Image (cartoon, grey):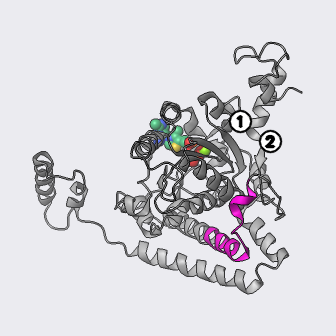
Amino acid sequence: MPSPEQWTRPEPGAGPAATAAEPTPEQVIAGLRATTEGGAELTQLLTPEGERIPSAMFDPYVTDVDAEALRGLYRDMVLVRRADREANAMQRQGQLGIWVPLLGQEAAQVGSGRALQARDMAFPSYREHGVAYTRGVDFRELLGIFRCTDHGGWDFQRHGFHPYTIVIGNQVLNAAGYAMGQKFEGKVGDDDNAEATICYFGDGATSQGDVHEGFVWAAVYDAPLVFFCQNNQWAISEPTERQSRLPLYQRARGYGFPGLRVDGNDVLGCLAVTRWALDECRRGNGPVLIEAFTYRMDAHTTTDDPSRYRLSDELEVWKHKDPIERVRVHLARSGGADQTFFDDVDAEADRFAAELRDFCFNMPDPPPERLFENVYSEPSPVLDAQREEYLSYLAGFGAGEH
Ligand SMILES: Cc1ncc(C[n+]2csc(CCOP(=O)(O)OP(=O)(O)O)c2C)c(N)n1
Ligand SMILES: [Mg+2]
């Protein structure tokens, strides 16, 4: 059976390369399979059964992850999941305009987020609540965005975490420019202060021109940029296999930088692979593409109904690969945590959710003029005029009627 590897990279002497215009039916099928299954080249340090798999290449990047550190990663994922579920419920109760669930992607986000250092910069799309958490962004700030009372006003430089981007793929260009700046300013090299950038986007975004352009710019400038693609198998209702004939990580080769696929439900694997990739970038060997192979276990957003386009047995299969459960099993079996620890984390998650709930229900509506704040750094007469016009329009309704 020809593999997609043969399809794109024929062995010397193996005859003419099959081109995209003339693959055999077997090659097309092999290519499609490779986009939907993990594939042989999946890096995995912790199996769904909680078994630790040694890796000569990536173990050196997680030597510090002892039982205590693993308990920390477990706690991160439980808190993030609990907050996500609470926000989802609050949308259903009319407290949020919309919510974008991350259920199932906790390991990809916590593992990669915890790999970053304070001076690194992250560019998210709109689902990266777990990364936001690892960067110290208060979850309450995220709720403001989805309640439509806030534009996402955290100090992105202090947190090393840019504002959310809804326009698919656009943040890849921003990240490429930022990473080129790091390169131009001499922040890449062997010294301990070297920096890198990480950019998050989905499988669907890889079909977007901005992502292609970002790949090209980062490659030709050797920018210290980790492209972190969370392949959650779906772009709303469009499955990955309808968007690519190749596993996504293999696209990196066409741009001239390394690409690899990690089990996105394996927090240890995501941590190790992202640390490795950031290290490569800091030393001037960037960019790198990481495809985190995961699954969106909930709807695209609270406005979406996935039962319209996918079979529920798919979800059942992925439930067995749950990112949190495998760490729990590993900790329990290896003696790294006892029941008291798990109970304590659950209780902490409940308290965290209750706080979020309390905050959200009591969140004051911002004054209407808030809309005009933080648009430009300098005063703008045009904006001032718009503000005056809008406020006098509202005043025309009389007190309490708007
Ligand atoms: C430029 C652009 N086109 C279309 C959309 C509508 N849209 C919102 S999310 C989405 C799918 C994105 O899928 P993916 O990149 O896989 O990310 P995921 O939502 O799965 O995390 C689309 C097409 C958009 N926001 N921006
Ligand atoms: Mg997707």
Residue at (16, 57) in percent of width and height: 394
Identify which amino acid the numbered label 1 is placed on: Pro
Can I make out residue 295 in this image?
Answer: yes
Q: Residue 201 appears at what percent x and percent y?
A: 55, 45
Q: Are marks 1 and 2 in contact (CB under 8 Å)?
A: yes
Cβ of mark 1 under 8 A from ligand 2: no
- Between residue 170 and residue 119, name the one nearer to us: 119
Mark 2 highlights which residue? 39
Mark 1 highlights which residue? 247
- Between residue 167 and residue 181, name the one nearer to us: 181
Q: Residue furthest bottom?
A: 340
Q: Residue furthest right?
A: 1
Residue 74 covered by magenta stretch:
yes
Q: Left or right: 79 with respect to 391?
A: right
Q: Residue 391 appears at what percent x and percent y?
A: 14, 57
Q: Left or right: 298 with respect to 184?
A: right
Q: Earlier in the sequence, mark 1 or mark 2?
A: 2
Residue 368 covered by magenta stretch:
no
Can I make out residue 104 in this image?
Answer: no
Q: Is residue 338 above or below residue 112?
A: below
**Distance from the alpha carbon under mark 1 to that under mark 2:** 9 Å
Residue density around tag 2, few if under 14, some if 14–19, many if 20 or more, within 10 Å: few
Residue density around tag 1, few if under 14, some if 14–19, many if 20 or more, within 10 Å: many
Residue 147 figure quarter: bottom left
Say which quadrant the C terminus sits in. bottom left
Residue at (52, 79) in percent of width and height: 354
Secondary structure found at label 1: loop
Q: Mark number for residue 349?
A: none
Write down the region rendered in magenta. Answer: 58-77
Q: Residue 199 appears at what percent x and percent y?
A: 52, 47
Identify which amino acid the numbered label 2 is placed on: Gly
- Is the stretch drawn in magenta largely helix, strand or loop? helix
